Amino acid sequence: MVKVVVIAGPTATGKSKLALDLERYFPLEIISADSMQVYRHMDIGTAKPTPEEMSLVKHHLVSIKDPDEPWSVEEFNERASHAVEEICGRGKVPFIVGGTGLYIRALLSDYPLGDASPDPDFRRAMRKFAEKQGNQALHALLKDKDPESWKTLHPNDLKRVIRALEYHRATGQPISARRVKNPASPYDPLKLAIRWNRQDLGVRIDNRVEDQFREGFVEEVARLFSLGYDASAASMQGLGYKEIGYYLDGLLTLEETKALIKRNTRRLAKRQFTWFSREEGIIWLEASQDRNWEDIVREASELIRSHLAGSGEV
């Protein structure tokens, strides 16, 4: 089996930093399991690795799509599997890093994904329903069909709400029930995640949002609009981009926009924590403002070294 390392967990916990810091210990390449980092021109709002970081460690599935191009868990699974093969062929360790839990589950579980192909007509109908009846009404349709998705998905996460409804329509099953259907997965994963207490994570989220605005987040969104991308592109509904769109349309003040992004990021982190808490086999690395970051890096490196022992990769 192919040994891989997963660094998962909620947003703003330090997943990417940990992976980059582990480059000192292991010959690694990073596969991004982030549903937004695939898009070009969307760098600041997605906390994409910098050019310097990407020159230090090779990254896969970053900046490979235009903002109006489709991207799905099916395509992620195919491309990520190919990337794992390439990385192993170079004698390096695949590190799968990101907070999109469904992507990680799809790759590691090796379950078939072709049982619910995209249905553009259904998606358009659901978007029109949301426009007329509201996001809450669309989200409520999940309650009986897929209770787990109804609990974990935010009503404003239209892309995933519609995908869950689409999957149920095609298969008669909840998308949240897609578990391991082929136990012969080719991967032997070590799954790590970083856990901060709520207060510390809230501070990290606030600081990240303020940094993003200082780095030019508003200008990034304005440039996307100038390139012809608008709210009709699914990527522009991503966290931060939608809210700044409201600001650029004069619907919010700058401070209201920041506050809304901070609030929505906290909600995202809570949903991600709920998701990963239900995943089997995750080892949580405890982080706090009082714990030295290098202690976390060393703890992770020891766990990874033990996992790779005997594989010939270290």
Image (cartoon, rainbow, N blue to C red):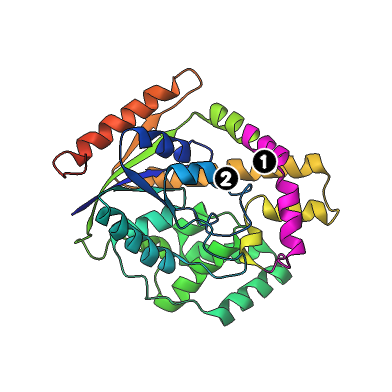
Residue 288 x, y percent position in the rendering: 47, 23
At numbered mark 2, what does the secondary structure look like: helix, strand or loop? loop
Q: Which residue is mark 2?
A: 47
Q: Main SS type for the magenta part?
A: helix
Question: Is residue 49 among what the camera can see?
Answer: no
Pointers 2 and 1 in contact (C-beta within 8 Å): yes
Along the line of sight, which residue is nearer the eye, 96 or 267?
A: 96
Name above or below for residue 95 compared with residue 23. below
Name above or below for residue 68 compared with residue 151. below
Q: Which residue is mark 1?
A: 212
Give the CA separation, mark 2 to mark 1: 8 Å
Along the line of sight, which residue is nearer the eye, 19 or 171?
A: 19
Residue 202 located left or right of residue 15: right
Mark 2 residue crowding within 10 angstroms, few (<14) / some (14–19) / many (20+)? some
> Which region is colored magenta?
207-232
Residue 195 x, y percent position in the rendering: 44, 33
Name the outermost residue toward the bottom.
Answer: 121
Question: Is residue 311 among what the camera can see?
Answer: yes
Instruction: Please tell me how many numbered marks the rendered image carries.
Output: 2
User: Which of the 4 quarters of the picture holds residue 103?
Assistant: bottom left
Along the line of sight, which residue is nearer the eye, 308 or 127?
A: 308
Name the outermost residue toward the top.
Answer: 290
Q: Earlier in the sequence, mark 2 or mark 1?
A: 2
Residue 176 located left or right of residue 232: left
Residue at the image point whose x is 65% and y is 59% from the top: 237
Q: Which mark is residue 1?
A: none
